[in-house]
Amino acid sequence: MKKSNVPQDIGLAGRMSEISYAVNKNGRYELVQSYGWDPKTTSLKQAWKVIIEEIENVIKNVKAGKVSPLAYHMAKNQMNTGLLAKYTRISRWRVKRHLKPEVFNHLDPAILERYAGVFEITPEQLAQVPDSVDFSFFKNWK
């Protein structure tokens, strides 16, 4: 892309710019500031909508007693069982088992501490789930 064609649409971050590579008059690549690109902004908004819906569904399932609060923290941090297993050094099948409320409620404090450490929260916060997700920043996007 030529330097003069670098898009300057206002993105999700407002007037915050990002760096792109573009070809200058001499045919060499150069770093150019860009405020965003409408197609990129649209796709990011769509992705955030899906993420928010997934987190809200997980909250409903936690409140209904179908899954443990661990599922909420995984969804909020965009983690699956395999990734959380690697971070905590707990086997994947045990992480899946800890997603059951009856198992989670009887976990050893040391295991809760490992999960809390990954999410950078306290073990007490690990057991808490909000009534809804605060994505007020998303509602302001046009």
Image: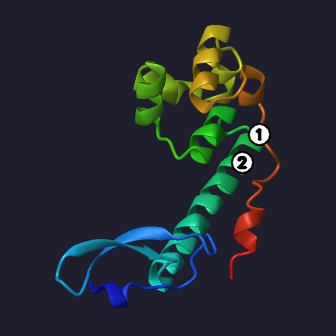
**The residue positioned farthest toward the bottom in the image shown:** 4
Q: Is residue 68 visible?
A: no
Q: Position of residue 118 (x, y in %)?
A: 56, 27
Amino acid on which disc 2 is placed: Ile
**The residue positioned farthest toward the front in the image shown:** 26
In contact (CB < 8 Å): disc 2 and disc 1: yes
**What residue is at 79 percent from the left and 53 percent from the top?**
132
Of 4 and 97, nearer the camera is 4
Write down the residue under mark 1.
129
Q: Position of residue 24 (x, y in %)?
A: 25, 82
Write down the residue under mark 2.
59
Of 86 and 131, nearer the camera is 86
**What residue is at 40 percent from the left and 26 percent from the top?**
86
Q: Quadrant of residue 101?
A: top right
Q: Is residue 32 visible?
A: yes
**The residue positioned farthest toward the left in the image shown:** 27
Q: Quadrant of residue 106?
A: top right
Q: Is residue 19 left or right of residue 118?
A: left
Other residues around mark 1 within 10 Å, as few (<14) / some (14–19) / many (≥20)? some
Is residue 14 placed above or below 74 in the rendered structure?
A: below
Is residue 76 placed above or below 122 in the rendered structure?
A: below
Is residue 57 placed above or below 73 in the rendered structure?
A: below
Q: Position of residue 123 (x, y in %)?
A: 72, 21
Q: Is residue 123 left or right of residue 26?
A: right
Of 100 and 27, nearer the camera is 27
Amino acid on which disc 1 is placed: Val
Quadrant holding the C terminus: bottom right
